[in-house]
């Protein structure tokens, strides 16, 4: 099974792709789809959609796992990230209906054993779980890989995380 993990973002949308046989995981690739400040919103969203479509055509994921949004105090940023998540979901559902979502706390719990783990602890565990030489950069990509690992580890219980 191939899982594409997505950390939604407007400037940087992190992604990580993992193949698993149910016991072992193999990292196929990771990175970010980037948009540039100053570019009109509609073109940034289009770039994110095209980037998702490119990833899907390269990796042909069976499942796509999204990190749920966490809203801070900046409403404008939250709206933009929500729009970015929306175009990513549209691109993914064009390929598969197997879309799942996990909260940041669920991802931390699955990766480190603690829902209160900090970002560095999660990154260290991602590195260790996938036998990587270095912590994946940027942070958005590491978060997306962690989301994909979480989905791989969900096994049969993944249905409770299916997008509704």
Image: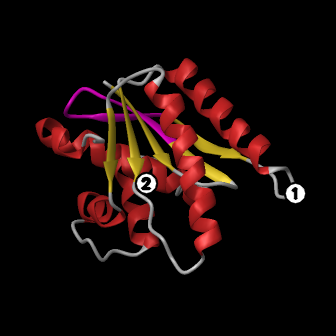
* Number of numbered callouts drawn: 2
Left or right of 112 on screen, residue 9: right
- Where residue 142 sits in the image (x, y, percent)? 50, 54
Residue 63: in sight, yes or no?
Answer: yes
Spatial distance from mark 2 to mark 1, Cα to Cα?
34 Å
Q: Quadrant of residue 117?
A: bottom left
Residue at 29%, 49% (x, y): give it.
150
First in residue order: circle 2 vs circle 1? 1
The residue closer to the viewer here, 17 or 132, is 17
Vertically, is 139 above or below 76? above
**Label 1 residue SS:** loop
User: Which secondary structure lies at badge 2?
Assistant: helix
Q: Residues within 10 Å of mark 2 (few under 14, many from 20)?
A: some
**Span shown in magenta:** 16-28
Crowd band around label 1 with a 10 angstrom C-alpha radius: few (<14), some (14–19), many (20+): few
Q: Which SS type dominates the magenta stretch?
A: strand
The outermost residue toward the bottom is 73
At 56% across and 18% down in the image, what residue appears? 57
User: Where is 125 relative to 147, above or below?
Assistant: below
Q: In which quadrant of the rendered view does residue 81 lie? A: bottom right
Q: Quadrant of the C terminus?
A: top left
Residue 63 at x, y = what percent?
A: 35, 30
**Residue shown at 30% from the left, 41% from the top:** 163
Farthest-out residue, left: 156
Left or right of 112, for residue 8: right
Q: Residue 27 magenta-drawn?
A: yes
Residue 115 in the magenta stretch? The answer is: no
In percent of the image, x 44 and y 67: which residue is there? 70
The numbered dot on residue 38 is 1
Question: What residue would you read off at disc 2?
Answer: 127
The image position of residue 17, as x and y in percent, is: 46, 35
């Amino acid at each position: 099974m191939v899982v594409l993990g997505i950390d939604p973002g407007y400037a940087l949308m992190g992604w990580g792709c993992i193949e698993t046989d149910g016991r072992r995981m193999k990292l196929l690739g990771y990175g970010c789809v980037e948009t540039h400040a100053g570019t009109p919103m509609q073109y940034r969203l289009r770039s994110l959609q095209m980037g998702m479509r490119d990833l899907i055509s390269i990796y042909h994921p069976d499942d796509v796992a999204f990190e749920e949004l966490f809203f801070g105090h900046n409403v404008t940023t939250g709206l933009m990230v929500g729009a970015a998540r929306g175009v990513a979901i549209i691109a993914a559902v064009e390929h598969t209906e197997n879309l799942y979502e996990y909260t940041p706390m669920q991802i931390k719990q699955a990766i480190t054993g603690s829902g209160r783990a900090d970002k560095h602890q999660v990154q260290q565990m991602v590195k260790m779980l996938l036998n990587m030489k270095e912590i994946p950069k940027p942070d958005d990509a590491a978060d997306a890989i962690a989301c994909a690992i979480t989905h791989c580890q969900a096994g049969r219980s993944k249905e409770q995380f299916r997008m509704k």
